[in-house]
Image: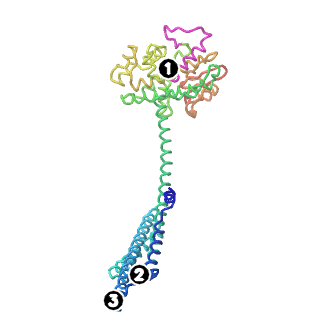
Amino acid sequence: MDSVKRSAVTPSKSRLARTFAKVLHLRMVTGVAPVDGIQKIKAPESSKDDQDTGSWSRSQSYDDNDEKLRNTAELEAHLAQLFASISSVKSAYAQLQYAQSPYDSNGIQSADQIVVSELKNLSELKRCYLKKQFDPSPERTLCLAEIQEQKSLLKTYEIMRKKLECQMKLKDSEITFLREKLEDCHKQNKSLEKRLNPSAHLSVLDNLHLSGISPSHFITVLQHTVKSIRSFVRLMINEMESSGWDINAAAAAIQPSVVFLKATHRCLAFESFVCREMFDSFHFPNFSLPNESLPEQNQWQRFFFERFIKLKSTRVKEYLAQKPKSTFGKFCRAKYLKLVHPKMESSFFGNLSQRSIVNSGKFPDTPFFTSFSEMAKRVWLLHCLAFSFNPEAKIFQVNKGCPFSEVYMESIIDEPSPAPDCPPETHSRVAFTVVPGFRIGKTVIQCQVYLSQC
C-alpha cells in the first residue's frame, strides 16, 4: 500500500524533464568506457592467438554498439531541431494572424522575418539529413531544441490569450449594444402597448382615493380626453379626404363666416364640432340619458367615483362586448348616432352597416368605431370625475364675438395681429370655442378658443 501511495503522489515528468533525463542517459552511455565497472573474472587458460582474437572481437562489438547509440542520439537531436523549427513557424504564423486585426505593421514584419528564417533553417536541416551531417553534440542540441520548442509553445499560447481577450472585449461590446437595443425595444413595446390600450395612460391615477381628488387630477384626465378627441378628428378628416369631401366647405358649414389664418386651422372647426356634440348635456348627472336611475344626491360623489375607478383601467372594446346595455354602452350608442350623420357614414364606408349594428344594441369591430369608443370613454371618465367633486365641476364655453379674457380663455393658436381697419375695441375677439372650460370650486380651467383678426 505504501508503494502505491508514493506512486500516486509522485508528479509525472514534464517533457523538458524527460529530455534532460535522455541527455544524461546519452552521456552515461557514450561517455563511459564499456569495460569500466565490470568485474574481471579469470578466464581459462588458452593460447595467445586465441586471446588476441577474442579481445579484438569484443572491442569491435563495443564499437559497433557505441556507433549505433551515437547515430540514434544524433537522429533524435536532428528530429528535435526539426520539431522546434516547426513550432517556431507555427508561433510566428499565429503572431502574423494576430497582427492583422488590428493592423500592426511592426508585428507583421517581425513575424514574417521569423517565418523566413525558420524556413531557411528547415531547408538546412533537410540538407544536413540528406548528407548525414549531424551535430557532433547531440545531447546539447536535443536540450536546446526542446527549450526552443517550449518557448515557441509559450509564445503561441500568449498570442492565443491576447486573441481571446480581444474577442472577449468584442463580445462585451456586442452585449452592451444588444442591451441598449433591448431597452429600445422595451420602450417601443411600451409605446405600442399604450396605443393599443390608451387606458394605460391614466396609470398615474391608480392609487387615487375619493378623499384625495383634486383639480390637478381632473386636468390630467381632461388632457387625455382632448388628445383622444383630436386623434378621432384626424381619422375623420382622413376619411373625408379619401371620400372626396370639400374640406373648406365642410369647415365653413360648421363655423360659418370664420376666416382661418392658415389652411391647417380648418381641423379646429371639426374639433369644435366633435367637442360640442360629445360634451352636450355634460352638466347632467347621466348625460340626460332616459330611464337611468341615480342614487340620492348626497351619494353622488362615491357613486360617480366608483364608476370612474371601475372603467378607468378596462379596455373599452371588451367592456362594451360584455356589457352592451350598460349606462356607458347607452352613452356610446346615443353619441355615435348623433355625431356620425348617416350621409357621413355612407360616404366613408359605402353603407350604413355600422349604424345598423349600433341600432341593434351591439357595437361594430372597426378601426373607426374603436377610435370613437375610446374618445367616448375619456369623455365619460371626465364626466364621472367631475361629479366626484363636491360641489361638482361645472362646464362652460364662450360665445362668438366675446372679448378675449386670459382668466377664462386660452388661445389655441398665437394671438393674431389685428387687421388695419379693425377698431381697437374689437381686437382679440373669440371666433368659436374649440374645447370647453371647467370650474371646480374656485379653480378655473380655461376653455380653448380660436381668435379672429377683428
Placement of the C terminus among the 4 image quadrants: top right
Mark 2 crowd level (few <14, some 14–19, many ≥20, 10 Å Cα): some
Real-space Cα separation, disc 2 to disc 1, in angstroms: 106 Å
Which percent across, then down, holds residue 395?
58, 19
Q: Which residue is mark 3?
A: 50
Residue that lies at the very extreme toward the front in this rendered image:
45
Range of residues picked out in magenta: 286-313
164 or 70: nearer the viewer: 70
Q: Secondary structure at mark 1?
A: helix
> Three-letter amino acid code at disc 2?
Asp
**Separation of marks 2 and 3 at Cα, in angstroms:** 40 Å
Mark 1, Cα crowd under 10 Å, few <14 / some 14-19 / many 20+, is many
Question: Real-space Cα distance between discs 1 and 3?
Answer: 139 Å
- Image height check: is 27 above or below 344? below
Q: In the depicted view, which residue is nearer to us: 254 or 157?
A: 157
- At a point 51% along the width and 26% down the height, the residue shown is 199
Q: Amino acid at mark 3?
A: Asp
Badge nearest the viewer, 2 or 3: 3
Q: Earlier in the sequence, mark 2 or mark 3?
A: 3
> Residue 407's x, y, as percent?
64, 26
Asked whether residue 441 appears in the rendered view, the answer is yes
